[in-house]
Image (spheres, grey):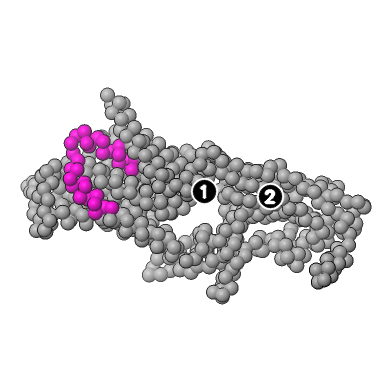
Amino acid sequence: MQLYLPIAEVSVNAFTLLGLGGLVGILSGMFGVGGGFLITPLLMFIGIPPGVAVATGANQVVASSVSGVLAHVKRRTVDFRMGLVLLAGGMVGSGLGIWVFSILRGMGQVELLVQLSYVVFLGLIGLMMAQESIRALRRSARPGPPRRAHQHFLVHRLPLKMKFRASGLYISAIPPLVVGAAVGFLAAIMGVGGGFIMVPAMIYLLGMPTKVVIGTSLFQIIFVTGFTTLMHAVTAYSVDIMLAVVLILGGVIGAQIGTQIGLRLKAERLRLLLALLVLSVSVKIGFDLVLQPAELYSVMPGRLP
Amino acid sequence: MIRLVLALLVLVAWPVRAEQVVAGLSQNRVAITANYDGSEIVVFAAVSRDAPPPEGRLDVIVTIEGPVEPVVVWRKARRFGIWVNTEAVEIGSAPAFYAIATTGPLPEIVDDSYNQAYRIGVGQVLRGLDVAERMPDSDQFAEALVRLRRESGDYQVDAGSVRLDHQTLIRTDVRLPANLTEGRFRARIFLLREGRVIALEETAIYVQKEGIERFLHRLALDQPLIYGILSLAIAILAGWLASAAFQWIRR
């Protein structure tokens, strides 16, 4: 069954979209990530224009984050105060990202921007996660001395200190603001929630306890991707509701299956698998940039500035 | 005066308006609905004459041209080891869709001068290449645009697909692609004798989004804020429903 997308103005097979949504849903259920970093490149691959793919990807992340955060709110594993500070930074970063995005759209370089950020950020995060999970796997194989629960970083010496009760932290508000802004920027130009950057940053930079990290990250991702969606809709008219609905439908069903699979796997193994997945997306896009493309010309509607 | 002379000249040069073409389309409205996946337009026409057909080979060309829009063609080149869009040429007006159906290969059935004057061939449809900042190889960009659109099926050349029976009845099918843009499409039916255009009939096809497609597209452009909020509301509702369904299933 073909489905004509009113904003993307392309006709796509509805079951392909449902399948894409479902596949990403399975992975996001397994690994506890939004899956934006998979959906956006996949949409571009099936012929959705990059602008629409990024904006609609952000909209899809809103849905998966809402469904994720509700479970965490019930378990009281969301640090709302930290979430709000991250969010304040996130709004600034997202606004900045939208601005850069629209400038580069005029210069014909949006695709390059999206591809480069995928290669760089997914590559970095994938490597870090792979390294960490391999170390964790080794550690669990032969038991050694446990790590200190509380570590002191440079972060603790900055001004503007705030108390974050749910995280049991008393730290400066500047690092969370910066982390939030970086993630907001990525959300705007990559169509992702940025959980893959937020989660390690919260654990290793801010020293937050692992149990509140996912819930808090999801909480702030809802707002940042929501803001991003709205901004893309207003500045570029590039959110495709029809596309989003089908993706979300597939994603919701996939997430249920994914969660069940995730429960049966070991946490370190799961992280290693996710790292390999992130790395392979990065390498694939990287090759596309480096190898000579089969087609050197491309057509975009509109005029030169 | 000059006009009168010209009109007279035309009359002299084209003295026998003995052959006319009358055309009809299977539909002159195309509705893009949610499950639109292309449509077929049947063009039928008849040659009417008040005398027996004159000597010479009779040919027919049918063209369907979509709405024109400005486009930018980018070319990639290697910069710092990666492939980047480096050069661009703006083409002021390029039809989003163009189809030609003929009774034979185009160069054989139409004289070059007529081809250019009436802009019949696929190579003739692009206009508005900016001459001022024309690069030495800007023709390559135009050729690339035509090639890309032919590969995607937006530009079609179908030589020999027009049926001409008894030098009178004309019929052909033109397939409109699934990725269609809205607007007024222009259908032209040329009648040619010995490579010269002797009659031309023109008619329009209106392509429009309908129903939910039309509603969403208009809303996105006219009320972007409301549209954005609607997208968010759907996403939040879907997320909440999913989480509620999860819990209900687990119980």
Q: Residue furthest front?
A: B1
Mark 2 element type: strand
Marks counted in the figure total: 2
In the rendering, at what x and y percent does residue A57 appear? 38, 47
| Crowd rating for badge 1 (residues with CA inside 10 Å; few <14, some 14–19, many 20+) | some
Give the chain letter at badge 1.
Answer: A
In the rendering, at what x and y percent does residue B225 appear? 40, 47
Of residues A226 and A205, the one nearer the viewer is A226
- Residue A71 in magenta stretch: yes
Mark 1 element type: loop
- Residue A282 in magenta stretch: no
- Dot 1 amino acid type: Glu
| Residue named by callout 1 | A9
For residue B226, which quarter of the picture? top left
Q: Is residue A199 left or right of residue A159?
A: right
Q: Main secondary structure of the magenta part?
A: helix
Q: Disc 2 or disc 1, which is closer to the eye?
A: 2
A215 in relation to A54, above or below: above
Q: Residue furthest right?
A: B51
Q: Which residues are magenta?
A: A62-91
A271 in relation to B65, above or below: above
B157 in relation to B81, above or below: above
| Crowd rating for badge 2 (residues with CA inside 10 Å; few <14, some 14–19, many 20+) | some
Q: Is residue B240 left or right of residue B230?
A: left
Residue A275 shows in this picture: no
Of residues A283 and A255, the one nearer the viewer is A255
Measure the alpha-carbon separation of dots 2 and 1. 22 Å
- Dot 2 amino acid type: Ala
Residue A160 shows in this picture: yes
| Residue named by callout 2 | B204
Picture residue at 56% right of the left edge, 41% below the top: B210
